[in-house]
């Protein structure tokens, strides 16, 4: 596909200043060409539908906070049989965009950045614009089943792992001396 690598497949840019003090709601629907391009990007068979509703509100001085919900129907290839596997996706998400957020490591410690229970650092708001379509595409990608499997699909017996040989039996309780090697095998 010959497309500009800097333009997302599903692009809906929005200027932060257009949100206003009361916020606003945006409804997005991907057209057939956008859905086909997203399917190619995600290496799946099809994106049959993709719609989202996003509530935007001002955040701090120049940022935007958004809360959204996307609904999509996609088809992926089964990881075992390659048969088509339809999937219905419904996801709610929240994101915050702030100018200067591309330098998040300067404001968040390493512990904060890698704390799974912690607050996510804000996404960068570059030139005062957030691409709502690309946000929705990212959330869809994160929500796809990584191992889609058709009902009844089983790995052929020739490709299944062999049963593991019986592990060596541990010596009876009290007879194993793990530090004996350090002492040259002597009992003390």
Image (cartoon, rainbow, N blue to C red):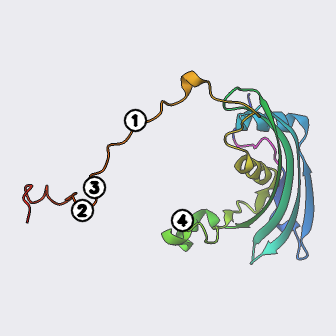
Which residue sits at x=48%, y=30%?
A: 162
Q: Position of residue 117 (x, y in %)?
A: 61, 70
**Res 114 label:** 4
Relative side of 99 to 184, left or right: right
Q: Which residue is mark 1?
A: 165
* Residue 174's disc number: 2
Q: Is there a contact, CB below 8 Å, between mark 3 and mark 2?
A: yes
Q: Hey, which quadrant is residue 179 in on the image? A: bottom left
Name the side, left or right, on which 32 lies relative to 122.
right
Placement of the N terminus among the 4 image quadrants: top right
Region in magenta: 6-11
**Residue 28 spot, x, y in % from top left:** 90, 51
Q: Main secondary structure of the magenta part?
A: loop
User: Looking at the image, can residue 4 be seen?
Assistant: no
Q: Residue at x 55, y 67 (%)?
A: 113
Q: Picture coordinates of residue 128 (x, y %)?
A: 76, 63
Label 1 Cα crowd, 10 Å radius (few <14 / some 14-19 / many 20+):
few
Question: Which tag, 1 or 3, sits closer to the chain's start?
Answer: 1
Is residue 182 something one can see in this rendering? yes
Vertical comparison of 114 with 6: above or below: below
| Residue lying farthest to the front in this orientation | 172
Q: Which mark is residue 172?
A: 3
Q: Earlier in the sequence, mark 4 or mark 2?
A: 4
């Amino acid at each position: 596909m010959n497309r500009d690598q800097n333009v997302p497949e599903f692009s809906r840019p929005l200027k932060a200043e257009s949100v206003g003090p009361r916020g606003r709601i945006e409804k997005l629907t991907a057209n057939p060409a956008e859905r086909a391009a997203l399917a190619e990007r995600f290496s799946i068979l099809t994106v049959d539908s993709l719609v989202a509703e996003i509530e935007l509100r001002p955040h701090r001085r120049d940022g935007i906070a958004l809360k959204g919900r996307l609904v999509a129907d996609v088809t992926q290839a089964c990881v075992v049989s390659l048969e088509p596997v339809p999937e219905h996706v419904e996801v709610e998400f929240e994101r915050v965009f702030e100018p200067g957020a591309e330098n998040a490591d300067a404001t968040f410690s390493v512990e904060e950045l890698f704390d799974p229970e912690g607050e996510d650092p804000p996404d960068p708001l570059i030139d005062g614009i957030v691409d709502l379509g690309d946000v929705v595409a990212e959330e869809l990608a994160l929500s796809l089943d990584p191992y889609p499997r058709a009902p009844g699909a089983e790995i052929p017996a020739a490709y299944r792992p062999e049963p593991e040989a019986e592990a060596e039996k541990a010596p009876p309780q009290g007879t194993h001396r793990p530090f004996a090697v350090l002492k040259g095998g002597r009992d003390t």
